[in-house]
Image (spheres, rainbow, N blue to C red):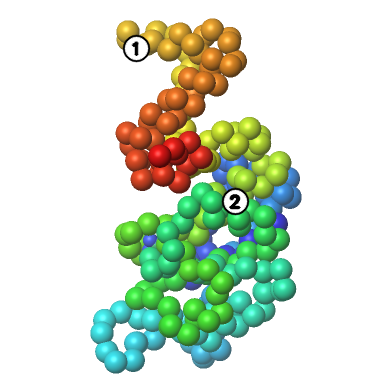
Amino acid sequence: MKIDILTLFPNMYEGFKTESIIKRALASNLVEINIHNIRDYSKDPHNKTDDYGFGGGKGMVMMPQPVFDAIESLKTEDTVVIMMTPQGDTYKQSMAYEFSLKKHIIILCGHYEGFDERISSIVDYEISIGDYVLTGGELPSMILTDSIVRLIDGVIEKESHEEETFNNNLLDYPVYTKPVDFRGMKVPEVLLSGHHANIKKWREEKSLEKTKLKRPDLIEKSWFYEN
Ligand code: ADE
């Protein structure tokens, strides 16, 4: 898979690409992540990428020309273009699965007051990472990339994401490590029993219990939902 990120702040991706699982995925060529400066595509004599919005109001607006040129020069027939914007659809694990199967993704990061509305015509998805406003789309693009890359075959053990939170719309079951007794708080007996069927059943119950308590909104969408 190839991910091209279009940004005005390429330096923000330094640490992102050089640490932990993303670093390993890049080193093993399981993914290619390229960071492009939108400014490099500007035809303005001063490489401008934004200007005042028509009709007044404060804040600068991203101009269509550099964004269109950047996307058009990178796009192939296998590409999906994703725009990061607080006005987009709220990002979910199911979308991460969908995107992890794509060959080529372009992620467009905005800044300033927003994108010129005409930019929407060249993107396939407009995605928000939640109902709050950040200074730009760079952190959201890293969140998207991280959530997608970890699902690519070979990046992490398959079992790690087959059983994790949001699969089947349930939160993860509780996990414990050593010591068995920490300040009087004990690891549940069943986990020490070695009885796989009982452990599985306990985990399913806890997963459901936790979801009902913390995210009842997810329950209805789960396979466990019964009227
Ligand atoms: N840009 C600024 N805020 C954002 C958000 N919540 N999601 C995606 N992109 C953004």
For residue 20, the mark is: none
Q: Amino acid at mark 1?
A: Met
* Residue 170 appears in the figure: no
C-alpha distance separating marks 2 and 1: 36 Å
Q: Earlier in the sequence, mark 2 or mark 1?
A: 2
The residue closer to the viewer here, 107 or 33, is 107
Q: Toward the viewer: 101 or 184?
A: 101
Q: Under 8 Å from ligand 1: the CB of mark 2?
A: no
**Residue highlighted by disc 1:** 185
Q: Amino acid at mark 2?
A: Tyr
Q: Quadrant of residue 218?
A: top left
Q: The C terminus appears in which quarter of the rendering?
A: top left
Q: Quadrant of ligand 1?
A: bottom left
Instruction: Tell me residue 198's x, y (percent).
Output: 54, 15
* Residue at 52% across, 64% down: 10
Please state, as top left, top right, bottom left or bottom right, where the N terminus lies in the image.
bottom right
In the displayed structure, does residue 220 sit left or right of residue 160? left
Q: Residues within 10 Å of mark 2 (few under 14, many from 20)?
A: some
* x 67%, y 79%: residue: 73
Specify the label residue 97 is tagged with. 2
The image position of residue 30, as x and y in percent, is 72, 49
Q: Contact (CB < 8 A) between labels 2 and 1?
A: no
- How crowded pointer 1 is (Cα within 10 Å; few <14, some 14-19, many 20+) is rated as few
Q: Position of residue 161 (x, y in %)?
A: 59, 38
Residue 90 placement (x, y as % from top left): 42, 59
State the SS at label 1: strand
* Residue shown at the point (60%, 15%) measured from the top left: 196
Position of residue 160 relative to residue 137, above or below, is above
